[in-house]
Image (spheres, rainbow, N blue to C red):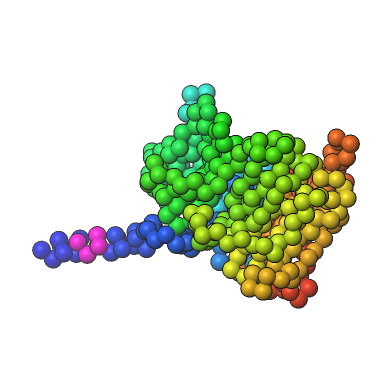
Amino acid sequence: MKKAISILLLLCIYAELLTACDPAVPITDEYTEKQDCQYMYGSSMEFRMCASEDSYYYLAPTGTIYLIDKQTLQCVPFCSKPNCSHDNSACTARTQSKGIWFYQDALYVTDPREDVTAETNELETYGLYRLSLDGTTKDLVRSVGSSILGGFIHRGYYYANDFDGIRRYSLSDQESSELIFENDSNITYSVTSAYGNHLYISRSDIEKIHEDLFVEIEKWDTPVSICDVTRSSETNDSCLQENRISSFGGKTLVLTKVSVTDDYTKMYDGSVLITDQTGKNEEPIDYVQINKDTLMFGSFSADNKYCYHLYTPPFNGTKESWQNACFIVYDRNTEKKVEELPIFEQYGNPYGMYLGDERYLFLEFEPGCYYENEEYITISDPYRSLCVVDKQSIGKGASIRELIRVTP
């Protein structure tokens, strides 16, 4: 009898240890640290940044992962090997992944499997790998597809944009994968972000060029439309109505609404709104800077305190219009502009904006380009740079600081 009781106690202790090592998937519709997609480090489906308690991690276009110390902002390749050149697959800082994700005290990436043959299923040609935070180990979690448009990890699953649609792969069951939204000849889907019990997805079809949707996890048949991009003939010229989610942030979304000609030679209207997660209860942000004559509009993000505006022309902007591009910060309480920093001459064209945490906001830049006589002119050699803005210095003379510059 005593022996049976001892075995029972051991089993109970073992079960408790398993629970402690593998936290239960949360069911609350709130952001859960270490379990949820870090939406604040995503930009246009590219999750090239993430963060742990002590560090930020940046996946450069070169395929090198950089570790950035949160206290000093010192940047080094994510590798523990002495005298490593960081130029081959044996280095833990090197990857072919479309993104990098932090989940349960580890980093995750996807890389091609070395044992792939002609008979290998297309959904198993890559591996999802777990990297220890000290950079010493890289362990295969499971096989996945190539995820041609990226994805992210959220609450026990890897959500991926595969060739056949949006698929999710279980992290605990290597055999379990599920096609939750299937592409066909007329409709394509992609998953863009997640928050709590909901996913944000985009859909493209013949009638609507682009549509952003909000869907509750496990209830795939009931997506809610938030905004879309359509063509209209309400004006004398063919008109493109762009209503897009420009920033994901906790319980709020930033929406941009622009009405332009198909060739971006004229802007009819432009506005910015902050809404709840489902796109309802719209709050117009009337104080942002918009110039219809020059088509200067750009992209936006916001947190509880500030609204961040990359004030730029469209892709076919002239050199003069790009020279007027700047990074603007508005105080949401006073509705006043508190910072305006030029960007084109020193940093180039904005590529992405990451909301970051309570201390820092990150900006990515690529070579400065402009449009002249139907030709693109580039003002420098190819590069991609990651820059940072200290939020605590906003309103006191904030600056943009370059952290990393690489040549793709």
Q: Answer whether residue 263 is magenta in the image.
A: no
Above or below: residue 295 compared with residue 21: above
Number of marks in the rendered image: 0
Rendered-image quadrant of the N terminus = bottom left
Q: 227 or 343, which lies in front?
A: 227
- Residue at the location (69% across, 39% down)? 235
Vertical order, 188 against 365 (above or below): above
Measured as percent of width and height from the top left, residue 84 is found at 69, 51
Magenta span has 9?
Answer: yes
| Residue drawn at the location 78% of the way across and 54% of the way down | 291
Would residue 260 be seen by someone viewing this image from the given angle? Answer: yes
Question: Residue 100 location, x and y as percent?
Answer: 58, 50
- On screen, residue 68 versus residue 117, left or right, reads right
Residue depicted at x 47% and y 28%: 121
Percent across and percent down for residue 339 are 76, 68
What range of the chain is rendered magenta?
Answer: 8-12
- Left or right of 372: which side holds 81? left
Residue sticking out furthest to the top: 118
Spot the residue most to the bottom. 396
On the question of residue 141 being in view, the answer is: no
Looking at this view, is 131 or 182 the one in front?
Answer: 182
Quarter of the image that includes the C terminus: top right
Residue at the image point whose x is 20% and y is 60% from the top = 7
Location of residue 66 (image quadrant): bottom right
At which x and y percent is residue 247?
Answer: 60, 55
Residue 371, by quadrant, is: top right
Give the residue furthest to the left. 1
Q: Choose top left, top right, bottom left or bottom right for residue 336.
A: bottom right
Question: What secondary structure characterizes most of the magenta part?
Answer: helix
